[in-house]
Image (tube, rainbow, N blue to C red):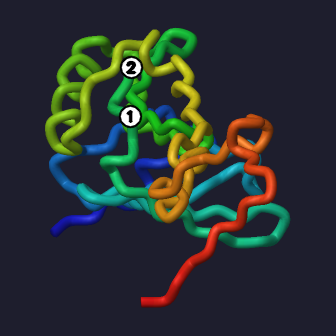
Amino acid sequence: MRRQTAISGINPAGSSRALRLDPLSLPVSFDAHDTRADGGVRQIELHRERVVLRRAIQGMRMAVNVRVRDFLGVALRGIDDAQMLVLVHRDPSLTIPLCVSSDRDEIAAAWPMWSDILGLPQLPEDKAREPAPRRRRHNAIRVRRPKFLVRRRGGDLLNPANIHQGEREIIAPD
């Protein structure tokens, strides 16, 4: 198994190379731009089943392990004069760049390859930016009566027909 190095990640000063990862040679390890991380860099390990993001924020180092199936899909985004393929997550800070190129044919060929290898759908640009729907917080079971109270009938104490004057119920033992 061949491993790609960090050379394919953030470009060194003076380099004209764009980010191009090969989907056929996973696992891949590379650096990507992260504005909130110390040094503006986060380290990414991309496998077929999982993604590991490592970064440091204010001196605290962290590693986030995310399953590939938790991502929404592979999306195409336009930036300036180039296009970028990204692995889109519900949380925008976990979105991962896969390929940056100004060649439209190269992007068009890489998009279905990444989608097939990771087993994720190809997302159009407008679908990728749509926020996730909110989950319902209403719990229907919580308002139900407990099981032992379901067997009993609810009483009506305010009904005068239920009040017997001077009568007592006597229960005799068997």
- Residue drawn at (51%, 9%) of the image: 81
List the residue tagged with mark 1: 72
Q: Does residue 51 appear to the left or right of 93 in the view shown?
A: left
- Is residue 140 visible from the viewing direction of this image? yes
Q: Position of residue 33 (x, y in %)?
A: 62, 44
Q: Residue furthest right?
A: 58
Disc tally is 2
List the residue tagged with mark 2: 76
Of the two numbered discs 2 and 1 in the rendering, the one whose residue sits closer to the viewer: 1
Q: Secondary structure beneath disc 2?
A: strand
Question: Quick one: 5 or 135, which is closer to the camera?
Answer: 135
- Is residue 12 visible from the viewing direction of this image? no
Q: Position of residue 101 (x, y in %)?
A: 39, 23
Amino acid type for the residue under numbered disc 2:
Leu
Q: Secondary structure beneath disc 1?
A: loop
Q: Does residue 145 appear to the left or right of 70 in the view shown?
A: right
The quadrant of the picture occupied by the C terminus is bottom left
